[in-house]
Image: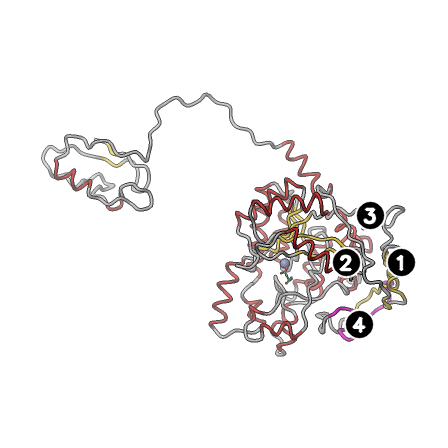
Amino acid sequence: MILDFIIPRRGQSLLEAYDQWKAWAEPKVCCDYSFHMAVTWWNDKVGEEMETMVKERGVNSFKMFMAYKDVMMLNDAEMYQVFCRCKEIGGLAQVHAENGDLIDECSKKLIALGITGPEGHAMCRPEEVEGEATNRAVTIANRAGCPLYVVHVMSRAAGDVVSAARKEGKVVFGEPIAAGLGVDGTNYWDKDWRHAAAYVLGPPLRPDTSTPGYLMDLLANGDLTCVGTDNCTFNANQKALGKDDFRKIPNGVNGVEDRMSIVWEKGVHSGKLDENKFVAVTSTNAAKVFNLYPRKGRIAVGSDADIVVWDPQATRKISASTHHQAVDFNIFEGQVCHGVAVYVLSQGKVVVEDGGHVKVTQGAGKYIPRKPFSDYVYKRIKVRDGLNQPKAVEREPYKGPVIDLNAEPQEEPKRVAPSVAAEFESRPISSRHGHRDLHASGFSLSGRQIDDNRGNTPHRRVLAPPGGASSIQF
Ligand SMILES: NC(=O)NCCC(=O)O
Ligand SMILES: [Zn+2]
């Protein structure tokens, strides 16, 4: 089964986008499928449509972009609103965590410096940009009391944020993808433009070559939960839209077809995961998080017969020349992986046999609606909400005087000589607060006044610094 992302255009109705994606899928899809919904803009109507998505279309996960400024990016306040809405309707908030403002600024600088190739894509979004956004998403989710799923965790920094949040007990899930576990970001510096551009995705692969192994370690210890792919392929001539400007290279790489082999090779064959953990991170955990379990993610009477017969000893060499995906490049080209799917059954029918021969029927895949409030995600949240209702302090009402800080000042005391009073009144009104600007006053913090030398004029003292709520004593 696959879960695809519906991505409405900014301003487009979620329902309309759903219908469009469904119409694309229905005649072609070869296995069961369901949808996540991206929330690329926000207003009350979007909030209402999210509820319709959950109740009438079986969509229970909503992705927000913290990157792609001016196209799909939401700001923090909008994210908070969407997270709150997710919580009300039992949806799972998903984030693409990168700081879109910083990426935008930095990429402009790089272009001005003449760095236009794919390496610029990695240089303008270093891992702190992912780490910061991941931390911000965790914070916003925590303020909204909403569970969070971080899609495509691509760096040590982001992985560490997810680990720390989980250690603190926050309901946060992190998803590495096949690309991040199988290859690294040194490819962006390849001399062949076509090769380098083929690896462009967001967040990028990291030039730190220890990153794939580190992400696998987090998967092994349970800090990361499910292996996704974010499969989103473009041919070389489509990537070439950005031949003179890395910002125009369409983001996305392959992953679905090779995901299982990559996880087996880098995880099980390396001794980091056992076979049971392999099943959990490639299937069962996702079924639980997205509320498909036990229909999917389990082999048992009553569950769907989507089954892989796996030969752990067999090997295969990954190549664009033999793969089945509609793309002319494979980011795992040449890798030899242990672990081969000898047979695959979908809905009880054999769709792959003899270690690779595919025989599917287009349109045979069924849309699988998903219910909200998945236990795996929401059970802890519900208990906590029951225990932690915010409560006001009970106290006697305040009965003293209340001063209106915006009211016109009282008449100046009579004892101030008229010329001094005129000088005081002539100080400009500050544009920000509508009050007199004490920084420009003749008062001094030492207590010295403009009229100190005037015979019997009384002495005035400022009790609080300028800019704050000062009171002047006579
Ligand atoms: N990972 C990736 O670049 N996919 C394309 C859209 C997205 O950024 O999620
Ligand atoms: Zn994304």
* Residue 318, x across and y down, in percent: 78, 71
Q: Which residue is mark 4?
A: 317
Q: Which residue is found at the position 59% from the left and 53% from the top?
A: 134
User: Which disc, if any, is residue 357?
Assistant: none
Quadrant of the image for the N terminus? Answer: bottom right
User: Which disc, if any, is residue 26?
Assistant: 2
Under circle 1, the secondary element is strand
Relative side of 459 to 82, left or right: left
* Residue 60, x across and y down, in percent: 69, 47
State which tag comes first along the sequence, 1 or 4: 4
Q: Quadrant of residue 257?
A: bottom right
Q: Which residue is found at the position 35% from the left and 27% from the top?
A: 402
Relative side of 137 to 289, left or right: left
Above or below: residue 468 compared with residue 122: above
Do the numbered discs 2 and 4 sit on residues whose CB atoms are within 8 Å? no
Relative side of 134 to 405, left or right: right
Q: Which residue is mark 3?
A: 295
Q: Amino acid at mark 1?
A: Lys
State which tag comes first along the sequence, 1 or 3: 3
Does the magenta segment cover residue 417? no
- Disc 2 and disc 3: Cα gap in Å? 21 Å
- Disc 1 and disc 2: Cα gap in Å? 19 Å
Q: Quadrant of residue 122?
A: bottom right
Write down the region rendered in magenta.
Answer: 311-326
Q: Which residue is mark 1?
A: 349
Q: Which residue is found at the position 63% from the left and 73% from the top?
A: 196
Q: Amino acid at mark 3?
A: Arg
Does the magenta segment cover residue 313? yes
Q: Nearer the viewer, mark 2 or mark 4?
A: 2
Q: Nearer the viewer, mark 1 or mark 2?
A: 2
State which tag comes first along the sequence, 3 or 4: 3
Q: Nearer the viewer, mark 2 or mark 3?
A: 2
